[in-house]
């Protein structure tokens, strides 16, 4: 019957528009192509899907992001070089300050090679509030023979924000250079430098006098020891938090009073006195000494900055050289019979 339809109803060929899909059997595809060239999608599920799971839908302003990650610019500065206590008032619109600090240099003794230790260098960035007052303590360098150097500090009320340690004092004998050695240790970063021991003493009277140990980040340096036949021997004093060990005493009194503390220098003695330890977060130990005969050198203090600060750098000195050279010579250890240089504190914002 189907064969008769075109003959019986020829008008069907005119009324119907029949499109025939042409399939290339040699190169089959998933999508049939009509002879008109039109591509037919046979099922909606065949349409490619767009993965939006990794699309960036944030509304963060790239300019704001750049501002947050840009290195801060410090165009202004305040410098403090006079030993003692000062106040810095944070200016308006200032929320971050960068601090550079030098500890005080220890004073030299009179023994050959008995120079004072250099102060440490410490820097950090501190978040601040406009109008608040920060205490700035500038270290005093050792003045008298064997004095340990004071430390430089930045404080907010009772909270310590930065400490740059002082260097230890050099040792002295009773005849102005008969003995050799006893240089003070430099103020350190986390670890102060040990004071130098006696190298050459005076016969059996003074066979040994060790230097005070440098302080650590958590404890003061241990005091030095002595060995000899002379009667008046004094072991060194261990440093404590904020204070170096003292190295003074005559006729065997072996004083245990105030060594270099806070920003103050001190604690040393000539004429057979020891080198005092440098001040710091923890102070260095003082040297062992035998009165009127010989001494070792004092140990350097330790520097410190709390974890919430940023970009912190703690550099210890070496010998009489400070942790970082400054234009005004801050923190230089004293030559033999010479005073140590004062510290320095700079704030940029």
Image (cartoon, rainbow, N blue to C red):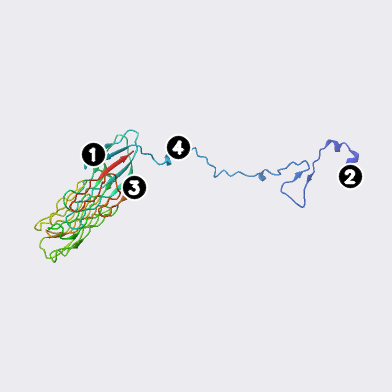
- The residue located at (27%, 43%) in the rendering is 345
Front residue of 100 and 124: 100
Of marks 4 and 3, the one in the foreground: 3
Which image quadrant is residue 125 in?
top left
Q: Earlier in the sequence, mark 2 or mark 3?
A: 2
| CB under 8 Å between discs 2 and 3 | no
Residue located beneath label 2 in the image: 3
Of marks 4 and 2, the one in the foreground: 4
Q: Is residue 235 above or below residue 129?
A: below
- Could you give the CA–CA distance between mark 1 and mark 2, rounded to whole angstroms? 115 Å
| CB under 8 Å between discs 4 and 3 | no
Front residue of 108 and 290: 108
Number of marks drawn: 4
Tag on residue 312? 3
Residue located beneath label 4 in the image: 64
- Could you give the CA–CA distance between mark 1 and mark 4, rounded to whole angstroms? 37 Å
| CB under 8 Å between discs 4 and 2 | no
Q: x, y (%) of residue 306?
A: 31, 47
Instruction: Judge the density around disc 2: few (<14), some (14-19), many (≥20) Cα neighbours within 10 Å.
Output: few
Q: x, y (%) of residue 7?
A: 91, 40
Tell which residue pokes out farthest to the left in this image. Answer: 251
């Amino acid at each position: 019957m189907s064969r008769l339809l075109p003959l019986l109803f020829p008008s069907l060929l005119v009324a119907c528009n029949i499109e025939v899909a042409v399939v290339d059997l040699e190169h089959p595809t998933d999508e049939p192509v009509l002879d008109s060239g039109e591509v037919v999608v046979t099922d909606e599920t065949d349409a490619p899907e767009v993965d939006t799971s990794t699309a960036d839908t944030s509304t963060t302003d790239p300019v704001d992001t750049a501002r947050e990650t840009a290195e801060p610019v410090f165009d202004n500065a305040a410098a403090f070089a006079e030993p003692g206590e000062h106040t810095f008032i944070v200016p308006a619109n200032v929320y971050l300050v960068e601090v550079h600090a030098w500890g005080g240099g220890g004073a030299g003794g009179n023994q050959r090679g008995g120079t004072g230790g250099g102060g440490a260098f410490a820097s950090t960035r501190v978040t601040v509030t406009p109008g608040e007052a920060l205490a700035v303590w500038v270290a005093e360098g050792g003045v008298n023979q064997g004095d340990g150097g004071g430390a430089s500090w930045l404080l907010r009320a009772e909270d310590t924000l930065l400490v740059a340690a002082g260097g230890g004092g050099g040792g002295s004998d009773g005849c102005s250079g008969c003995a050799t050695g006893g240089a003070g240790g430099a103020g350190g970063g986390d670890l102060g430098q040990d004071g130098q021991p006696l190298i050459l003493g005076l016969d059996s009277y003074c066979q040994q006098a060790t230097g005070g140990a440098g302080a650590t980040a958590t404890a003061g340096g241990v005091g030095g020891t002595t060995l000899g036949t002379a009667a008046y021997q004094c072991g060194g004093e261990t440093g404590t938090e904020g204070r170096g060990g003292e190295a003074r005493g005559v006729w065997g009194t072996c004083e245990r009073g105030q060594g270099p503390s806070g920003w103050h220098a001190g604690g040393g003695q000539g004429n057979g006195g020891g080198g005092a330890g440098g001040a710091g977060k923890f102070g260095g130990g003082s040297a062992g000494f035998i009165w009127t005969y010989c001494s070792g050198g004092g140990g350097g203090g330790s520097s410190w900055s709390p974890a919430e600060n940023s970009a912190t750098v703690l550099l210890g000195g070496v010998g009489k050289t400070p942790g970082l050279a400054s234009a005004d010579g801050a923190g230089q250890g004293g030559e033999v019979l010479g005073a140590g240089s004062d510290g320095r504190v700079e704030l940029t914002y």
